[in-house]
Image: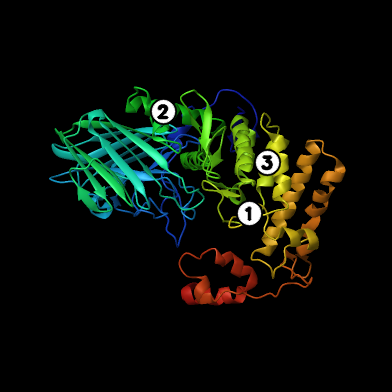
Amino acid sequence: MKKIILSTIATLFCVGSYAITDPVQYVNPLVGSHSTGGLSTGNTYPAIALPWGMNFWTPQTGKMGDGWCYTYDAEKIRGFKQTHQPSPWMNDYGMFNIMPECGEDYIFDEAKRASWFSHKAEVSKPHYYKVYLADYDIVTEVAPTSRAAIFRFTYPAGKSYLVVDAFDRGSYVKIIPEQHKIVGYTTRNSGGVPRNFKNYFVLQFDRPFTVTAISDAGQENKSALETTSKHAQGVVGFNTKRGEQVNVRVASSFISIEQAEQNLKELGNKTLEQVSEEGRQEWNKVLSTIDVQDESDIDRLRTFYSCLYRSVLFPRSFFEINAQGQVVHYSPYNGETLPGYLFADTGFWDTFRALFPLVNLMWPSMSQKMQEGWANAYKESGFLPEWSAPGHRACMVGNNSASVVADAYLKGVRGYNIDALWEAVKHGANADLPRTTSGRKQWQTYNKLGYVPYDSINESAARTLEYAFDDWSIYKLGQALGKPEKEIQVYAEHAMNYKNLFDKSHNLMRGKLANGEWAPNFNPFKWGDAFTEGNSWHYSWSVFHDPQGLRQLLRRRYPRDS
C-alpha cells in the first residue's frame, strides 16, 4: 500500500513519521446530510460501515422508500436501517430496519413509532454511532463489520421492545423464541435486480423474549411467529430494569439465511467496544494512506478526511465468504450464486475521472479485486456496468467502464482476468444493452458519422465527447497489451471524434444534426419548468443556451441584487 503525505507548503511523496496517527477522528459522517431534493449540500447520509463494506447502517429519518433517508434538519428517527444506497437518485435496495421502543405496548407504524432526537445527544463516527431516543428514554449504539453489526440498546425500566421492519413490496419475518433469534428477508429494491433477489437477515439476541408478535401488511397477530407478506414486521419484548442493556447481533446475506448466519461469525464473541475498536483501526489503516500535515486549521483536516471517508465507501463489496472460506457472490445480473469477487453501487460517469484513479494509486490491492469483479459482471451479463445498483441501471451517459479498466492496467494493477476485460471494452464500444446505459447508445451512428447526432438522442454532445475519450482509453489499453495495430487503430481514429463538435464561432463544443449542420441554439425548456424544485441541474445548462433568460429569472427572484 502506497503512502502520500500532503502538506500545505508542498506535496511530498515519501515515508516517515507522521503527526496524524488517528485520522478517523477527523471524519464527520454527518457532513453533506443537510440536503433535500431541491437543494443538495452533498445528498449524503451517515454511513456507519467499514471501507468498501457490504452493508452500511444509518439512522433513518425519512419515510420508507425515501431516497433522503437521513437529513440533518429532521427531528425524529424512525429506525436504524441497513442500507445499500449509493445516492438518493438511485435510492436503496435490500434494506430493513430495527427500532427499539418502550411503553405499555409496541408500535409497528413507522411514523407513530418515530422518536425525537437531538444532535447534541448523537455521536456519529464511521465505526460507531450512538443516539438518545427521547420519546423512549433509550440509548442506541451500533458498531459494524463488513457484513454484520452489533447493537446495544440501553432501556428504561418497564416493558421494552424491538421492532424488525422488513419493509414493503414483499418480505418475510420469522421469530424463533427458543433460539432468541429472528430471521427473514426483504425484497425491497429500486431496480437493477433479477426476480429472485432477496436480502436475508438474522438477528441474535442475548436474552429470551417475554413478548412476540407479527404484523402482516399492517394486520397484527400476537399468536403468530412467522409471516410472508407484502410488508412483514415482527416485534419481541423484554422486561427491563432502568439502564439494562440488550445486545443484538445482526448480519445479512444476498445468498441465503444460512450464509447470513455465516456472516454473523464476523462478530465472533466480541463486545461492541471491541468491534468498534477494530473498526477504528481498519479505518485508520485505510485513511492513513494519505497523511495531511496541516497544523494551522483543524477544519481543513476534517474536510479532507471526511471526503476521503466517502471515497472509500463505494464501490461496495458485493461478495461474501462461505463456510469453506471461498469468495462467492450472488449475481444481480443472472440471479445465480457464483464464485469470485463482485462490486456494486457506483456510476462510472461520476467516478472514472477521480475516484478510480485514486483507488488505483493508493489501494491497488482493492483495485485488483474490483477489476476481477468487473470481469465477472461482464461474464454474467454480457456487458460491463456503467451504473450498477446493484446490477445494470439506466442512468447517466458515456461508456466510461472502458476508461476504468484501462486506467487500472496502465497504472500497473495486475492479477486479474485482463483478457476478459479486453473483450468487454471492445464489445461495449459496439453494442448497447436495452433499458440500461451499459454499452453505447447510438453506437452505429457514432461509428458512421463520427459523432452522436443531436436529433437522435438527448445529451448527444456529452455522449460524443465521452465516447471519444473512451476510444482513446481502449487504444492505450490495447497498446499496453501488445495488441496488433490493425486491431486497435480504429479506436485511435475514433478518439479524434471530439474535433467534430468544436464550433469555432463559439469556441465551445456544440451538438450537430445528422445532416452535418449545427444544432439550433435555443433552450427547449420552459422557464417555469426548468427551475422547479428538484431541477437545479438545468441552471448550468441554461447559462450557456439562454443567458439573457437566466438574467431575467435572477432579477425576478433577487430584485435587490439585480
Neighbours of disc 1 within 10 Å: few (<14), some (14-19), many (20+):
some
Give above or below for 142 relative to 494: above
Q: Which residue matches tag 2?
A: 262
Give above or below for 457 relative to 109: below
Give above or below for 378 relative to 179: below
Q: Position of residue 284 (x, y in %)?
A: 48, 29
Element class at badge 2: helix
Query: Which one is in front, 524 or 427?
Result: 427
| Circle nearer the N terminus (1, 3) | 3
The amino acid marked with disc number 2 is Gln
Q: Is residue 425 left or right of residue 552?
A: right
Q: Which residue matches tag 3?
A: 405
Closer mark to the observer between disc 2 and disc 3:
2
Closer mark to the observer between disc 1 and disc 3:
1
Label for residue 348? none
Quadrant in the picture for residue 441: bottom right
Q: Is residue 426 left or right of residue 221?
A: right
The amino acid marked with disc number 3 is Val
